[in-house]
Image: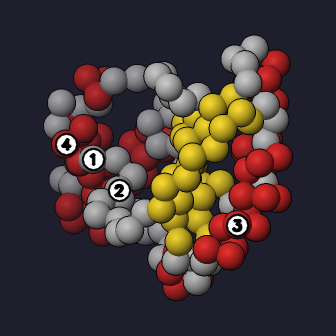
Amino acid sequence: MTTTNLDALDKAILAALLADGRQSQVDLAERVPLSPTAIARRIRALEERGVISGYQARINRTSLGLTMMAVVQISLKSQSEDLLAAFEKAAAAAPSITSCHMMSGEDDYIITVLAHDLEDFERIHKEQLSRLPGVARLRSSFVLREVVSRPLPLASLAR
């Protein structure tokens, strides 16, 4: 699905929802020149087409004491399909992993982990990361400061 399948009204609805996903259809209708009923119909169509894949609250992780974010580069012992599938299944089940991306290049995966502190990260490293199937090497870097975090750049809707 590309943005060429979206008209200007769909893009306006998506931009408004990215800015505030809790807006009512009445509020959206004030920003997008459509009736609340037409807004609801378009949102439902965007959901059915898979353009909108879900909704979630953005929670301030530090308010929950998760003050440490680590980016972990992982190399596996091999790239067999069975090992990749086992790794991905285990990574998806690991409660401290917030994202996991298969990569090209030197590392096979890059994951993001949230922890309360260095001691908590050490526990996660021992109990979760080092037990992932097929891990040959783990390299961790700690995020000093988050500069940008957005679900989708608004510019992607302009294309």
Q: CA distance from mark 4 to mark 1?
A: 5 Å
Residue neighbourhood size for the residue with mark 4, other residues' Cα within 10 Å, grouped as few (<14), some (14–19), many (≥20)? few
| Between discs 4 and 2, the one toward the N terminus | 2
Q: Amino acid at mark 3?
A: Glu
* Quarter of the image with the C terminus in it: top left
**Residue 126 on image: x %, y %:** 79, 58
Above/below status of 155 relative to 116: above
Q: CA distance from mark 4 to mark 2?
A: 12 Å
Q: Are marks 4 and 1 in contact (CB under 8 Å)?
A: yes
Q: Amino acid at mark 1?
A: Pro
Q: Which residue is mark 2?
A: 150
Residue neighbourhood size for the residue with mark 1, other residues' Cα within 10 Å, grouped as few (<14), some (14–19), many (≥20)? few
Q: Horizontal placement of 18 versus 92: left or right?
A: left
Identity of the residue drawn at 48% across and 62% down: 142
Q: CA distance from mark 3 to mark 4?
A: 39 Å
| Between discs 3 and 1, the one toward the N terminus | 3
Q: CA distance from mark 3 to mark 2?
A: 28 Å
Q: Secondary structure at mark 2?
A: loop
Q: Are marks 1 and 2 in contact (CB under 8 Å)?
A: yes
**Residue 66 on image: x %, y %:** 57, 76
Q: Secondary structure at mark 4?
A: helix
Q: Which residue is mark 1?
A: 153
Q: Secondary structure at mark 1?
A: loop
Tag of residue 122: 3
> Which image quadrant for residue 86?
top right
Q: CA distance from mark 1 to mark 2?
A: 7 Å
Above/below status of 144 relative to 10: below
> Which image quadrant for residue 121?
bottom right
Q: Amino acid at mark 4?
A: Ala
